[in-house]
Image (spheres, helix red, strand yellow):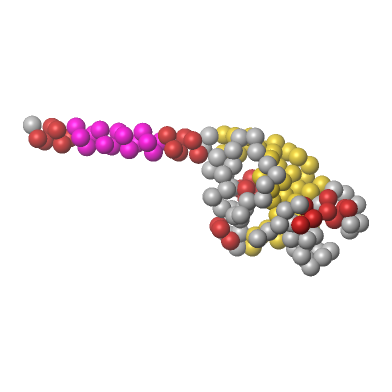
Amino acid sequence: MKRHISFILIFLLVISLVACGSKEVGNNSQPITVRISIDVKTALDKGYLDYDYILEELEVQATKSDTVWDILDRATKEKGIAVVKRGNGERLYISHIDSIGEFDFEKTSGWVFLINGEMPSYGAASKKVQIEDGDLIQWRFTLNVGKDLGKEIN
């Protein structure tokens, strides 16, 4: 009798773990649609360039488990746009997009990203930055550590 009860308890435990685990995986792998753009408007405004977008707003398919980096990498590869990065994971840094990069034009220039107009405190490959369906990811070139975008990097 004890053996049957132990078997039933173990069976119920395994079933509940599988159900909980698959529910979370299902949520993270759920397909979503986000928009991404890459702009150099600040450089255009200062006369350094004669165009304002490297990539105009584009819808891309993603999952909730994707990082901002995953989405940028996918979109730029699809469009044949070169990206230079350094590091990985939490320390991933985008230094150049389409040959425009950090320290080009001014000593405090470089790339930043915004999600729905807000600049996250984490890097592009951080899992701490949650991507949701309908989000707008903007990669923006800054000449002044984000101040020219109305933001500031801490």
Q: Where residue 44 sits in the image (x, y, percent)?
A: 88, 53
Q: Position of residue 101 (x, y in %)?
A: 76, 61
Q: Nearer the viewer, residue 101 or 137?
A: 137
The reply to whether residue 80 is visible in this rendering is no
Image quarter of residue 59: top right
Give above or below for 23 relative to 39.
above
Query: Which residue is at 79% across, 55% downward?
Result: 148
Seen at 73% across and 38% down, the residue is: 58
Q: Position of residue 4 (x, y in %)?
A: 13, 32
Q: Is residue 15 in the magenta section? A: yes
Vertical order, 68 against 153 (above or below): above
Which residue is rendered at x = 45% and y = 38% of the image? Answer: 25
Image quadrant where one finds the C terminus: bottom right
Q: Is residue 131 left or right of residue 35?
A: left
Task: Report x, y in % for residue 2.
Answer: 9, 35
Q: How many marks?
A: 0
Q: Is residue 45 left or right of residue 114?
A: right
Which image quadrant for residue 14? top left
The chief SS type of the magenta part is: helix
Residue 13 among those drawn in magenta: yes
Residue numbers of the magenta segment: 8-22
Residue 115 in sight from this viewpoint: yes
Front-most of 143 and 24?
Answer: 143
Kindly identify the residue that appears in the image at 77 percent across and 52 percent down. 149
Which quadrant, please, contains the N terminus? top left
Residue most extreme to the bottom: 107
